[in-house]
Image: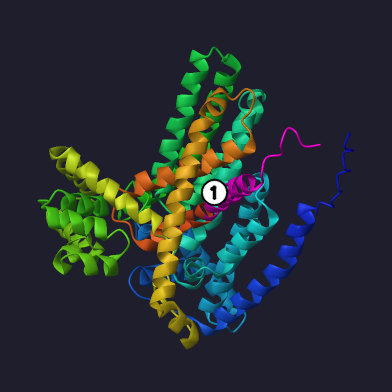
Amino acid sequence: MNARMPEKSFHRPDPGRQLRLFLWVLFPALFLYWAYLSFVTQMIVVHDSVNYEFLGRLIKDQGFPAYFQTGPHREPFYPILIALAMRLAEGMSLSYQTVLKVLQFIFLFLTQLLALRLMVRLNISPVLTGICLFYMGISPAFVNAALSLYSEIAAFPFAVLIVLAGGRVWTSLAEAPPRKAALGGAGLGAVFVFATLSKAIFQLVAALFIAGFAAVAVSAVLRKQPKTFRNILCFLAAFVLVYQGAVTCYKWANWTGNGTFTFTDRGAWALYGSTARRMEPLPGHRLLAAVAFAPGEEFCGKVANPEDCVFWSYRTSDDLGVNKLYELIGQGMSNQDINRTLLRFSIEKAVHNPAQYAILMAVEGLKMFFWESTGIGFVAYPDWLSAAHSLPLFKHGLRYLLAILTVLALGYGILVSWRGRRAVFCLSPPPEDRVLITGWITALILAHIISYSFFFILNRYVLPLAPLYIILIALFLQKCFRTTTRRSIPKRSAKAG
């Protein structure tokens, strides 16, 4: 008989030690790169950033009473950040923009730390985790968000926090006491409050999430799980109390200050402008241009009629919305009546041809996959970096590669979530972290796509989702690598000694 050879013993490296090594090497390099960019780049203050700068100065010089009295204005969190940068700059003899860039890089760093926590819970390999964290620090889109005078960077950490807080709450709904479920609801509601103060679109996202929890509550009733049902009710009550309470208080402050019970100054007319354009006649060449516009106006101009591409740009929808707004203002309507009228007009136009509206909503949602870009703009870079960003192979290759990976990763996230739906909805036993976190990331991304698809989507609107896209891509690539590795290892013969 053949003696079985003793198996060799291999030393398995500690993943935590590998990850710490990556962090000690990568983050100092990123800090040096960020510090360099903070001093050699310049924010280009045009378009919406002019208003952001004005609001920050208004808060710094005259406080919140003036902010509400002259409103309604944009979401307040980013103007507060600008006001803080202006205040700190006064005592440092620095430009407020330099201080603001440092604060925004701190937001990016916090986002990386939160993403790291999620990737550890997902058991993503240390090497892949390090690569993804490093890419988040050098990505043209991430860096541009940290260097420009636009509000998207403020929402970065809150998008990841929603997943962390939501995943923790979900695991406690089945067996935790009602008090813990209520505290979880209050905590998640508070995260949504800060997210909404950064980007108002989270109002729609929060409504979709509440509907999701309500569906789980119905599932608990059908499965005769009274304890789970009670906990979900406690969670929802606390969530609504904290979130809707804070949002209503902010709207009430607008009402007392300027007579408009609203959150921002542009939702109604932006919705009308987008809806009015979609309800225009839709010949085949115009639909082709709409699809071609998803990767960007430059791509659209190469494959479709330039006039049709201009039709699908933000300029057309803004013109339609603003013109109707001024028309209603000329009729002597109050801000509150104007918003209601614009909303009513939008609904009437949409239901006139719901199929066309739904198709163009889906086409608009395609833009959410083309988040990486070297040409977002509004930042003056050093010559060498501008030249690199302009290289066709680099700018197009990076954009389309990340778009393809994002589509594949989101598809994988949907697949994992669907396969684990029973564990997620039953809650007992709690679903594993991979299914739960993937489900939350996927749900948050889809909720954003649905919510933003009612409006015109600019490239920068997608950026708060970019950290979640990176995490999903890491999860997808790890699955691909492991599958390839397993296939490359030959099966051991049953007759082998």
Q: Position of residue 12 (x, y in %)?
A: 81, 51
Residue 119 visible to the viewer = yes
Residue 54 appears in view: no
Nearer-the-camera pick, 56 or 291: 291
The picture places residue 454, in percent across and down from the top left corner, at 29, 47
Number of residues whose C-alpha sits closer than 10 Å to that of mark 1, classed few (under 14), some (14–19) or many (20 or more):
many
Residue at horizontal 19%, vertical 66%? 310
Q: How many marks?
A: 1
Which residue is at a point 57% across and 15% down the rendered structure image?
225
Q: In which image quadrant can residue 301 be found?
A: bottom left
- The residue lying toward the viewer, choosing from 86 and 363, is 363
Horizontally, residue 263 falls left or right of residue 192, namely left
From the viewer's perspective, is residue 207 above or below residue 191? above
Q: Position of residue 185 (x, y in %)?
A: 57, 34
Residue at the spot of label 1: 476
Among the 4 quarters of the image, the one containing residue 286: bottom left
Tell me which segment is drawn in magenta. Answer: 470-497
Q: Is the C terminus in the top left, top right, bottom left or bottom right quadrant?
A: top right
Image quarter of the N terminus: top right
Q: Residue at x 53, y 55 (%)?
A: 470
Q: Amino acid at mark 1?
A: Phe
Judge left or right: residue 304 versus residue 136: left
